[in-house]
Amino acid sequence: MRTRVVFVHGIRTSATMWRGQLAALDRHGVDARAVDLPGHGARLGEEFTIDAAMDAVGAAVSAAHGDDRAPVLLVGLSLGGYLAMEYAGREPASIDGLVAAACGTLPRGGGLAAYRAAAGLVHRLPDHGLALNRRMAGLFLPPAAAVDIEAGGVALEVMSPALTAVGGLDPLASLARYPGPVWFVNGALDHFRADERTLLRAAADARLVIVPGATHLVSLTHPEAFTDTVLGAVAEVERRAALR
């Protein structure tokens, strides 16, 4: 039975950031879907909370399993990566593999405080940072990726509540509760890599994939390499499922 994939997006973007991966997986015959988190995409304006995010991810995982209980690989990037780890720790039996990308720094301490402060300054801009968001996407992403990242809308109001909520998570504890295979995927130039080895050690069955030349938004800057990693994870989950 083919593994099905659920994608969880990063902060301020939406499910549309995964359009390249969804198309690529479809070409390989892999059923994949992407979820909009509370306060993002089709759910702009909703309150962001961890529990609401877990409900959104859980609903997508349940739908992916379907009536035939197919294996499910959960894939998250940045905010989505932290939430995917949290979901794996809360519901370890509900997924068969986890890809956690661009979330290699523990969400605590001075790093998180600095990120929250910077987000607060950006939010004080007249447009709450929309023009800056577009400018950065245009500078650092391929044109198609820049379109995808904004196609579902930009969640201008979500930064502070989402960062505050993520600061209450404990990825190490979540990983310790999840016995399945984990793939940590980071761009070589990503600034969120400080604790990647600590996270790697916390998981029972994990491997680290570093994508050369890639930055934080590794799935967008290097979509082929990222998709290849996801396809490799799909194949591994299917191999293990066949042995059970």
Image: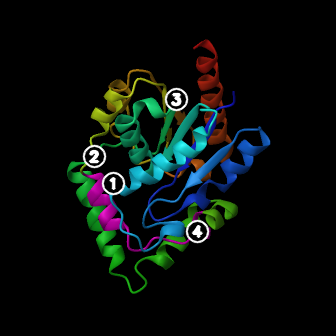
User: Contact, CB < 8 Å: mark 3 with mark 4?
Assistant: no
Which of discs 4 and 1 lies nearer the camera? The answer is: 1
Residue 222, can we see it?
Answer: no
User: How would you rate the neighbour count of disc 4 (Cα within 10 Å): few for under 14, some for 14-19, many for 20 or more?
Assistant: many
Distance between the Cα atoms at labels 1 and 2?
9 Å
Residue 88, can we see it?
Answer: yes
- Residue ID for mark 1: 50
Mark drawn on residue 96: 3
- Residue ID for mark 4: 152
Which of discs 2 and 3 lies nearer the camera? The answer is: 3
- Residue ID for mark 2: 169
Residue 69 picture location, percent across and down: 59, 32
Segment colored magenta: 149-167
Give 38 or 214, whichever is nearer the viewer: 38
Give 122 or 1, whichever is nearer the viewer: 1
Give 200 or 76, whichever is nearer the viewer: 76
